Amino acid sequence: MKKLTWQSLLVLIALWLTLYFNIHSWADKAVSWLPLTPDSRLREALAFFFYDAPKVLLLLSAVVFVMGVVNTWFTPERTRALLAGRSQGLANILAASLGVVTPFCSCSAVPLFIGFVQAGVPLGVTFSFLIAAPMVNEIALTLLLGLFGWKIAILYLSLGLLVAIVGGLILGRLKLEKYLEQWVQDIPKKLLSFESENLSFSARLHYGAVAVKDVVGKIWVYILLGIGVGAFIHGYVPENFMASFMGKEAWWSVPLAVMIGVPMYSSAAGIIPVVQALLAKGAALGTVLAFMMSVVALSLPEMIILRKVLTVKLIAIFISIVASGILLVGLIFNLVL
């Protein structure tokens, strides 16, 4: 890939802004060309898809590019060095906050975990990072901001950080190091230091472009699938149906949402269009946020990968504590809002 110049970056920004602010009119025009009656369910579903698909992909590309540039300063190695040797409390807050801006995916869970253990990062602090990184990441926050506004985005950020910090504190207090796999316990500790690479800004822009190619290239299919599910819900599922088992009146809606969400697997970008459709059909905000958090924070593939370093008992404790926190968040917000 050729290095990105300032001139080409400005052209891309202008193109992005043109596309983003014309999505609605272009989506309406595309639907109007189809031989469908104005009030048909299929038309509503397709209108949702034609509008959301380009909007989500544009937002995703922009935020991945920006965070790809930012991550040239906040690398995993630097994160480990910042957290090494710190005690619980403030370190849990720092770990959860770094999880928002540090690149992370399920496949990197084991090497990150091993690196933290080797650096002497307390187990509870490590868990705060592992909870926050997939759940309260820059992609989720940007898409929530673009689709729902700043209030919902800040609400999700606050709740996600709260679950990560408190969950990590509880896990740290329980002194669960003995439930790590033996080979992980035997890893020798070493002192870490980190010096930032002296990269030019042009090189950092290049890393941003590479991040877009890698991240968006890997997950665009799942995003379209998620938007397709959201479009189906938007067009074909009656509002009363969703409100009947995901509304505030159904006391069991939040536990059910968490139980359904934990075994599922989706990135934040893939599940947010589904969340958007559920809210539009009468689902309660607390229930939907609990569902989204459980899907992205406790995915089954990540638990399978973490099994390499954690015993089954520790994984069960981890899931129980995080799921309980998510459950409490959903119940409180359904009660208050």
Image (cartoon, rainbow, N blue to C red):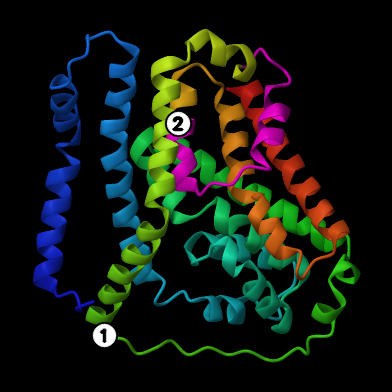
Q: Position of residue 175 (x, y in %)?
A: 88, 65
- Give me the C-alpha separation between circle 1 and circle 2: 42 Å
Along the polypeptide, which appears first: circle 1 or circle 2? 1
Camera sees residue 254 = yes
Task: Give the amino acid at mark 1.
Answer: Ser
103 vs 272: above or below: below
Q: Is residue 6 magenta?
A: no
Quadrant for the N terminus, please.
bottom left
Describe residue 36's horizontal placement relative to residue 138 as left or right.
left
Name the secondary structure under disc 1.
loop
Q: Main secondary structure of the magenta part?
A: helix
Q: Is residue 257 magenta?
A: yes
- Which residue was labeled with disc 1? 200
Task: Give the amino acid at mark 2.
Answer: Val
Mark linked to residue 229: 2
Residue 130, picture quadrant: bottom right
Residue at 75 percent across and 67 percent down: it is 88
The residue at the far right in this view is: 178
